[in-house]
């Protein structure tokens, strides 16, 4: 008899009738039948619609069809409601364990045939791999049970209910349930049967479950098997053909470990897997085993005896059209992209992914922190009153969740740490989960960030700790207080390995400071790196009123409460394009480090296990970005953790051009994730001879004038530029504003270590307060000579006493060339940081609009003072659209640092050539070329809101403010914060056409 399943969505019991213990998701030759496909579907607005749909003979012809797996809110063009995005907020009243009567409820039905050859099955099991949030199931009108735990697998024994031939399965899914209180992750709420449904024939004498625990020690491997099978199923045979293993265990008590004399270890870098089978007479299960040993020794986390450094990302399951529905090709490409960008670790934030994802992680090679489906963050709003994590009534539900998590995925070598969940406060239920894991899997450590004081977890973990704090955690002997810890608790935490389960919030343009975090990892062995928040934007493909496709975020579906674009915080955009931050990450965490010393180059292999035999090293020399020589370096094999020295090639130094030597480490062979020649690390050495910067030629004979004159290619009316060569051009106009980035708009945290900001107030707000977006100017003077023009303007904003004086001096250098020198001098009293110090030129629509740029400077992508590591010095070209990144919410983008020469182009034709001279401190300006002004960009909430434009806007910045991570993390480090300052910009301009 089944226990009665409570129909109440407020029931805390995780499952009625769901089989326990949970078991591994195995590849077995037992027969199975996928029930994915088209189901009949009806959506009701409340949980109380009649249950008669579950009856066998119910007439469902009038119902719609829906695919399974799918989220109903992403099907039917809005006919079934819409996604809701909240971060912490509960989208329903905080009234645990109750949820509102308005509870969208999806009823599903389909028929299936039990194949005739299933008659020998001992049992028939119906498996659901993921249903959000609570479901009940009937087969042929018989209620089988129900369960919650959206991203966990549940199996039901339906043997007694099924019959040969046609059967009917009916499923009722409630969007909200008590479980929603513990599934409050920062993501879209997406109800439905969103993972596979499978009918499984369990043979008599089959293998219910198997766990092959492997170990690796000094070249030797070990397999300890745990086999759940009836005694009558024995003998059981383990085969690992490649290793010559064929082990027969006659009885359950016989199952002794197998030692193997020589195996290759598994690591994220060399994910060596061996095919294995475990068989009885009735069933064969296929696994891929990897040999590795996980341990904590002192304050270090080791795999196979070597310290692991996580260059990780937080990965949600998200797809712009399918939501959390798994798409294997998409996931594989995502993981391959990670590998190409030097990502070596994944935290499965904040729930177990589709089980296949872990097969891919084993195969491609990632260190995985596998996280349980648990978050109660919304209780923060009520001071954590009633938090399920510390309420015994929820204990069983918590234990059920962790058991299903660990049991399902325990065989994967890639999983090296179990995580109890995310942001669920703290309490005894979490401690109980941890105890359960420790008892079940003595090897893998337990992680949970919210255990600040380390009461029940094995590693010390934090999110968004600043660089300074991270350093204090890593430093031996430091007494600096740790978050929420007494000094004694802090001392305990410092005895453990530390990781940042989240850092570097990659929302919009940013983050900065990857390199500062990375530097700490090399200084302090206790620090084991971290996981960037996060891999991918969660945008949902939608259509704007004018028909333009776009990626929707919170609020775009008319949600009652939502958290806007906080769900767009990945290093990869919703359409799959890597953002510049991913390139920066790749450069910072590159597995090979180069250090130049005279004519020598030190190559350090920073990897865990792999030597450099998979790499080759190429060099090239460029003069002002033009390749003049190249070759390959002979590099002896460098072991993991070692360095090798090689001589540099002789470099032909140019007397009148910059000479740069570039070294690339690239793949010598194709891999599963990149082709031969893929570059994994790059370094540059500047071999240029110093060349004097031409001084400003003093001019005499200045007299007041009307400013209407021509200086070679430059034409002025009333002191203002109107034309350069054939082109109408206006400017320079002082530009201090940038369209605030998400980090500029952040007001996160205290600002102890950074004087760049004001506590609790975003920089963007301060900029608007000071009127940086709405500067006006008053011409103070216009003077001219035969071949020069000088204007002074006072630039300030309405209702502000602050100002900036801008002196612009134009001089004719030759028939074809003018020089512009702009002196920017702030008044006394500016208090905030500035986003930029630049001048803007407008190039209105011409017959042939400017549509691209070629430049010699840093590139190819945008860069900012605290995100410069991916940029290299060279010659680059890009179309105007490609100079900007299409962030989900338009914002500052496109700044190219340290430009030497720039040409604006129309098709293949150069329209204007600009040479940027360094200032007396050797600083060079950067440039941005865009179709829109910062003000226009700042006014747009989505790319489709930007006005149509064919004009272009060139901003030359003496300096830009850094990026920081303040959308959720520390602000710009003081060294990279832009303080108001006097700056000079010097440009030499020619107009070829
Ligand atoms: C963390 C949380 C993540 C995400 C992130 C901000 O606090 O664990 O799920 O919300 O902040 O994007």
Image (tube, rainbow, N blue to C red):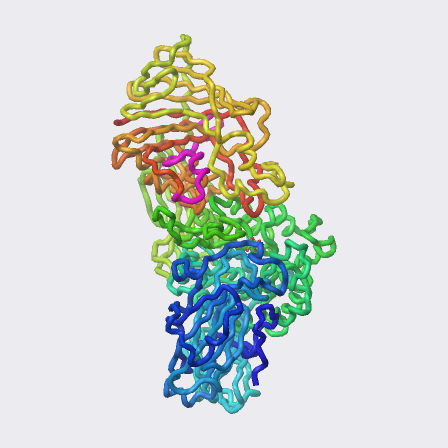
Report the side of 246 relative to 652 (left or right): right
Q: Residue at x 42, y 90 (%)?
A: 120
Q: Is residue 919 above or below residue 662?
A: above
Q: Is residue 588 above or below residue 338?
A: above
Q: Residue at x 37, y 73 (%)?
A: 61
The x, y position of residue 965, in whole percent, is 54, 45
**Image: magenta residue range:** 918-944
Image quarter for residue 671? bottom left
Residue 229 lies in magenta, yes or no? no
The x, y position of residue 16, in whole percent, is 57, 77
Can residue 64 be seen here? The reply is yes
Where on the image, by quarter, is ligand 1?
bottom right
Q: Is residue 73 above or below residue 579?
A: below
Can residue 223 be seen here? The reply is no
Q: Which is nearer the eye, 652 or 717?
A: 717
Q: Residue at x 57, y 69 (%)?
A: 9
The x, y position of residue 771, in whole percent, is 52, 29
The x, y position of residue 440, in whole percent, is 60, 74
Q: Which is nearer the eye, 403 or 229?
A: 403
């Amino acid at each position: 008899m089944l226990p009665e399943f409570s129909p109440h969505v407020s029931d805390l019991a995780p499952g009625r009738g769901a089989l326990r213990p949970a078991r591994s998701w195995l590849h077995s030759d037992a027969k199975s039948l996928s029930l994915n496909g088209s189901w009949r579907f009806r959506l009701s607005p409340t949980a109380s619609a009649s249950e008669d749909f579950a009856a066998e003979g119910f007439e469902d012809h009038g119902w719609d069809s829906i695919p399974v797996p799918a989220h109903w809110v992403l099907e039917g063009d809005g006919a079934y409601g819409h996604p809701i995005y909240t971060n912490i907020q509960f989208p329903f009243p905080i009234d645990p364990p109750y949820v509102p009567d308005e509870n969208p409820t999806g009823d599903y039905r389909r028929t299936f045939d039990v194949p005739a050859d299933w008659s020998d099955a001992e049992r028939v099991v119906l498996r659901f791999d993921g249903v959000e949030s609570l479901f009940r199931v009937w087969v042929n009108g018989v209620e089988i049970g129900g369960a919650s735990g959206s991203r966990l697998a549940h199996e039901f024994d339906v043997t007694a209910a099924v019959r040969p031939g046609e059967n009917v399965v009916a499923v009722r899914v409630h969007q909200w349930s008590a479980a929603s209180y513990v599934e409050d992750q920062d993501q879209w709420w997406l109800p439905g049967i969103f993972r596979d449904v499978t009918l499984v024939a369990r043979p008599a004498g089959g293998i219910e479950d198997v766990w092959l625990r492997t170990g690796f020690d000094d070249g030797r491997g070990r397999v300890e098997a745990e086999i759940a099978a009836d005694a009558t199923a024995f003998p059981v045979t383990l085969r690992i053909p490649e290793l010559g293993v064929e082990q027969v265990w006659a009885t359950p008590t016989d199952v002794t470990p197998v030692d193997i004399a020589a195996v290759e270890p598994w690591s994220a870098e060399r994910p060596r897997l061996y095919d294995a089978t475990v068989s009885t007479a009735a069933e064969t299960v296929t696994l891929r085993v990897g040999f590795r040993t996980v341990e904590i020794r002192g304050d270090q986390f080791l795999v196979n005896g070597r310290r692991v450094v996580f260059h990780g990302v937080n990965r949600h399951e998200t797809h712009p059209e399918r939501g959390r529905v798994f798409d294997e090709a998409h996931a594989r490409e995502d993981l391959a992209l990670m590998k190409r960008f030097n990502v070596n670790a994944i935290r499965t934030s904040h729930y177990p992914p589709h089980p296949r994802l872990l097969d891919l992680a084993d195969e491609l090679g990632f260190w995985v922190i596998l996280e349980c489906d648990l978050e109660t963050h919304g209780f923060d709003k009520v001071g954590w009153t009633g938090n399920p994590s510390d309420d015994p009534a929820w204990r069983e539900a918590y234990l059920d969740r962790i058991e299903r998590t660990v049991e399902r995925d325990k065989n994967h070598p890639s999983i090296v740490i179990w995580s109890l969940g995310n942001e669920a406060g703290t309490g005894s239920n979490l401690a109980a989960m941890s105890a359960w894991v420790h008892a079940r899997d003595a090897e893998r450590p337990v992680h949970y960030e919210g255990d600040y004081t380390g009461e029940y977890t094995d590693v010390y973990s934090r999110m968004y700790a600043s660089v300074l704090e991270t350093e204090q955690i890593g430093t031996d002997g430091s007494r600096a207080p740790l978050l929420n810890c007494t000094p004694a608790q802090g001392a305990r935490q410092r005895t453990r390995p530390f990781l940042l389960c989240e850092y570097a919030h990659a929302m919009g343009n940013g983050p900065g400071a990857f390199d500062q975090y990375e530097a700490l990892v090399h200084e302090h062995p206790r620090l084991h790196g971290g996981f960037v928040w996060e891999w991918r934007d969660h945008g949902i493909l939608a259509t704007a009123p004018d028909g333009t496709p776009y990626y929707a975020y919170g609020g775009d579906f008319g949600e009652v409460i939502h958290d806007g674009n906080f769900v767009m915080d990945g290093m990869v955009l919703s359409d799959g394009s890597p953002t510049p931050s991913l390139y920066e990450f790749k450069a910072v965490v590159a597995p090979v480090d180069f250090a130049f010393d005279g004519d020598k180059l030190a190559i350090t292999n920073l990897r865990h296990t792999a030597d450099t035999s998979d790499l080759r090293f190429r060099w090239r020399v460029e003069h002002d970005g033009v390749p003049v020589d190249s070759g390959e370096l002979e590099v002896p094999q460098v072991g993991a953790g070692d360095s090798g020295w090689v001589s540099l090639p002789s470099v032909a130094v140019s007397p009148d051009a910059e000479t740069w030597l570039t070294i690339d480490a690239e793949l010598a062979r194709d891999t599963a994730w990149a082709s031969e020649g893929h570059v994994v690390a790059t370094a540059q050495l500047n071999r240029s001879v110093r060349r004097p910067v031409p001084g400003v030629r003093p001019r005499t004979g200045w007299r007041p004038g009307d400013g209407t004159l021509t200086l070679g290619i430059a034409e002025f009316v009333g002191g203002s530029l109107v034309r350069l060569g054939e082109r109408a051009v206006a400017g320079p106009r002082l530009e201090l504003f940038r369209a605030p980035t998400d980090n500029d708009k952040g007001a996160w945290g205290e600002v102890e270590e950074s004087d760049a900001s004001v506590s609790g107030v975003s920089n963007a707000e301060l900029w608007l307060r000071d009127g940086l977006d709405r500067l006006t100017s008053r011409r103070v003077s216009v003077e001219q000579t035969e071949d020069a023009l000088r204007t002074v303007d006072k630039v300030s904003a309405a209702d502000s006493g602050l100002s900036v004086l801008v002196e612009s001096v134009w001089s004719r250098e030759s028939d074809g060339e003018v020089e512009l020198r702009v002196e920017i001098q702030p008044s006394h009293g500016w208090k905030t940081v500035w986003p930029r110090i630049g001048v803007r030129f407008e190039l209105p629509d011409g017959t042939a609009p400017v549509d691209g740029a070629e430049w010699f400077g840093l590139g190819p992508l945008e860069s900012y003072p605290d995100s410069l590591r991916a940029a290299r010095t060279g010659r680059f070209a890009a179309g105007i659209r490609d100079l900007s990144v299409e962030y989900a919410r338009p914002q500052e983008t496109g700044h190219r640092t340290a430009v030497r020469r720039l040409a604006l182009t129309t098709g293949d034709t150069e329209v204007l050539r600009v040479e940027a001279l360094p200032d007396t401190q050797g600083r060079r300006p950067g440039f941005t070329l865009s179709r829109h002004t910062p003000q226009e960009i700042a006014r747009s909430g989505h790319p489709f809101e930007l006005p149509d434009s064919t004009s272009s806007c060139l901003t030359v910045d003496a300096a830009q403010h850094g990026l920081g991570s303040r959308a959720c993390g520390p602000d710009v480090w003081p060294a990279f914060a832009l303080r108001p300052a006097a700056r000079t910009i010097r440009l030499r301009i020619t107009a070829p056409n």
